[in-house]
Amino acid sequence: MPGMSVELRPIRRQDVPGLTGLLGQLGYPTTEAAVHGRLDYWLDDPSSWLVGADDDGELIGVAALGVQPMLEVTGKLGRLLALVVDERYRGRGVGRSLVTAAEEQARIAGCVKMEVTSRRCRTRTHEFYQHLGYEDMCTSSARFVKSLAG
């Protein structure tokens, strides 16, 4: 499928309905009220960026970037915390545009590395990231997660 040109722009409060739908497509069903609350801390955090892909006023994709300083090396780490493109637009270059925008913002913020995680069942997604130059580090590194909620 041919690539398409989309407008990349910051996420705004008006994007809550579209963002809610995109998160559902990503496998994280939620409510507009919950997304509205999450934007409270996203939009005010100077080390976090949300970039949206817009097709004629419709939010069709989003990338979420978090930046943190590293102690083990000089520089910061950029982490692509979420990436989703509306299923109707996949395979048309929208995801690549969002990742490129997140990487550019990470460089501006002083990042020397970029990281992304993805569920093992998303093999097509893994191919996408590898095509963009990301390396699967799971053979040399482990990821541990602990819930701190309730």
Image (tube, rainbow, N blue to C red):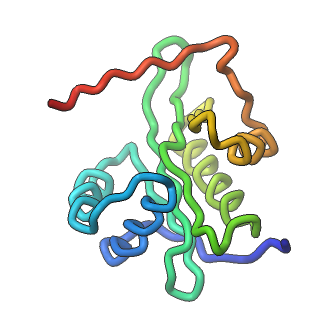
- Looking at the picture, how far across and down is residue 44, in whole percent? 27, 54
Q: Is 49 located above or below residue 35 in the figure? A: above
When the figure is inspected, residue 148 is found, relative to residue 35, above or below; the finding is above
Q: Nearer the viewer, residue 95 or 7?
A: 95
Q: Residue furthest front?
A: 121
Quarter occupied by residue 134: top right
Residue 119: x %, y % from top left: 57, 37
| Quadrant of the snapshot with the C terminus | top left
Q: Quadrant of residue 111?
A: top right
Q: Is residue 131 above or below residue 101?
A: above
Asked if residue 79 is positioned above or below residue 8 in the image, the reply reads above
Check the image and name the residue furthest to the right.
Answer: 2
Residue in the picture at 75% in, 76% down: 4
Question: What residue is shown at x 59% (from left), y 33% (from top)?
Answer: 115
**Residue 70 image point, x, y percent:** 48, 21
Is 61 left or right of 69, judged from the image as shown? right
Which residue is rendered at x = 43% and y = 31% of the image? Answer: 68
Q: How many numbered markers are drawn?
A: 0
Seen from this angle, which residue lies furthest left? 150
Of residues 101 and 23, the one drawn nearer to the viewer in this rendering: 23
**Position in image of residue 97 (x %, y %):** 68, 61
Q: Quadrant of the N terminus?
A: bottom right
Q: Quick check: 57 left or right of 138? A: left
Residue at horizontal 54 percent and vertical 25 percent from the top: 75
